[in-house]
Image (cartoon, rainbow, N blue to C red):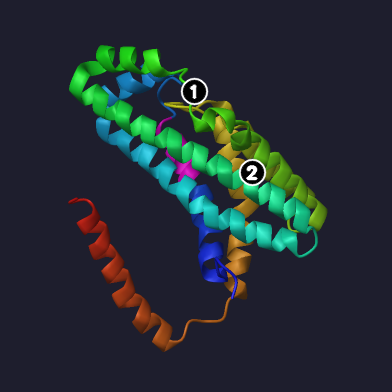
Amino acid sequence: MRFPNGWVGGTALVLGPVLLLVGTLLRSPFNFFFPDQLRAVAEHPELMRAAYTTFLAGNVVMWAAVACLAQRIGTKNPRWAAWGGMLVTVGLFGRTFHAGVDQAAFSATRQLGVEGATDLVAKGYGELHLFSFLSFTVMFGWFVLAFGAYRSGALGKIRSVALATMGLLPLGVLKGTEVLSIVGTAGLCIALVPLGILVLREQPRPTRKNVLTAVPVALGLGALAVLSTLG
């Protein structure tokens, strides 16, 4: 059996792009650069928390979507699948790292106020870390994956171009929404959501045993998620 399987991969192909687009749109009313983002956190904390959390959730879900697409590319072009899948996945790690810094900045805003948090972020903004050297993967990987999808026939020309627009999405800490952000995440939806629906339709219908097993597993995972917040 492949990992992720069709149910996981198909669901991720639908859910990941949609979450990224929703998160992008939620923070679109506010200016792009980090001082304005921190001011928005202070003035609209619930909306900004929802925006950044939704975007982060979509980014995490995308690992399975990328793996599923790479599997389909790999049936005809394994090298393009390997390079594209690897580069995009590392780029997803990079955005997840940025999201951790975003969360720390949000906490600083609550503790220090907007001016204190802005000063703190500004002083550390250019510091080197591992993902400073890997930031090219955040954007470049999508172009490689999109070309592989086109060469292999996993996606047609229009949807491959739509996938490549994700490489235009700005990167970095506390980045808000600009036109290219909406173009990139909307393009991702155009490219991958139809594929996700197709993948899900290809899967065998769940048996009664599968459904009955899934219920306690889901409840158990939910309980573990709650317990995780206590430690």
Label 1: which residue?
128
Q: Position of residue 199 (x, y in %)?
A: 61, 67
Report whether residue 48 is seen. yes
Q: Residue at x 44, y 37 (%)?
A: 97
Residue type at mark 1: give it.
Leu
Q: Foreground mark, 2 or 1?
A: 1
Give whichever of discs 2 and 1 has the lower sequence position. 2
As drawn, 25 above or below 226: above
Q: Position of residue 16 (x, y in %)?
A: 50, 51
Q: Main secondary structure of the magenta part?
A: helix
Q: Callout 1: helix, strand or loop?
A: loop
What is the count of numbered marks? Answer: 2
Query: Looking at this view, is 42 or 137 the one in front?
Result: 137
Query: Is 199 placed left or right of 56 in the picture?
Result: right
Rate crowding at label 2 as few (under 14), some (14 to 19) or many (20 or more) other CA atoms within 10 Å: many
Q: Residue at x 65, y 58 (%)?
A: 69
Rate crowding at label 1 as few (under 14), some (14 to 19) or many (20 or more) other CA atoms within 10 Å: few
CA–CA distance in space, label 2 to label 1: 20 Å
Q: Which residues are magenta?
A: 19-27
Query: Looking at this view, is 9 or 201 the one in front?
Result: 9
Q: Callout 2: helix, strand or loop?
A: helix
